[in-house]
Image (cartoon, rainbow, N blue to C red):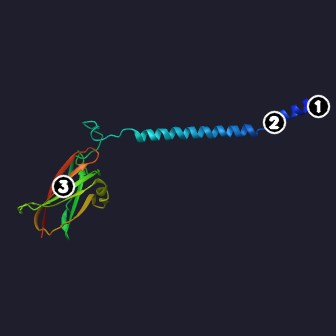
Amino acid sequence: MIGRLAILALVLAAVGCNDGPRKANIELRKQVADLEQRNTELERHIGALQAPTRTPATMPDPLPPQVVVTTGLLFGKLTAIENGVLKVYIVPTDKFGDEIKAAGTFTVELYDLDREQPRVQQWTVDADEALGQWVNMLTIYGYVIELPLTEPVDGELTVRVAFEETLTGRTFTEQHEIVTD
């Protein structure tokens, strides 16, 4: 009987001293902790994505003075008609008159005030399309919007641009005279 108890004690001691199950347990606990941390991060990320976004209707009015928004538009000197295309060089400006890159939708109208029906043509350039027409190189900083004409024009013309800023939803309008040959 003592021999059997001694063997059983040796077996239990050997099993108790084996680090295999303990190491596996520790490794599993580490993996669980890592997964719980990742899950918490993902839940935070999902919460941020589901949080209400600020829209022009929910933005404070007036806006804090640190927020840079459009307050006007400035035509570039190169605005002209070339080869049947109206090229509008225009840039939004802030409250200091500085040129800024602001997203928005453009409505461009071309007028010949000598005609009975003065509006020659109208175009709309949505915000996504407009961002693709932003230029920042050498002396050009702003939108260069190229619009094909459906009919030839000449003489003194007026280009009217309305810009609806995406951030605030406000619309700004400016016009510019051009002369063609």
Which residue is painted at 5% across and 61% down in the image?
A: 116
The quarter of the picture where the N terminus appears is top right
Residue at 49% in and 39% down? 43
Whichever of callouts 1 and 3 sits on the residue coming sooner in the sequence is 1
Camera-side residue of 179 and 5: 5
Q: Earlier in the sequence, mark 2 or mark 1?
A: 1
In this rendering, position of residue 89 left or right of residue 181: right
Q: Identify the image quadrant of residue 85.
A: bottom left
Report the Cα–Cα distance between label 2 and label 1: 18 Å
Residue type for callout 2 = Val
Percent of width and height locating residue 118: 9, 60
Badge 1 element = helix
Question: Front-most of 138 and 10?
Answer: 10
Q: Nearer the viewer, residue 132 or 117?
A: 117
Query: As shown in the figure, which amino acid type bears the numbered disc 1?
Result: Gly
In which quadrant will I find the C terminus? bottom left
Separation of marks 3 and 2 at Cα, in angstroms: 84 Å
Report which quarter residue 64 is drawn in. top left
Q: Which residue is mark 3?
A: 161
Question: Which residue is the site of mark 1?
Answer: 3
Residue at the top extreme, as displayed: 2
Q: CA distance from mark 1 to mark 3?
A: 102 Å
The residue that label 2 is drawn on is 15
Image position, residue 35 (x, y; %): 58, 40
Q: Which mark is residue 154?
A: none
Q: Residue 45 vs residue 146: left or right?
A: right
Q: Mark 3 belongs to which amino acid?
A: Val
Q: Residue drawn at (25%, 60%), measured in percent from left and top? A: 145
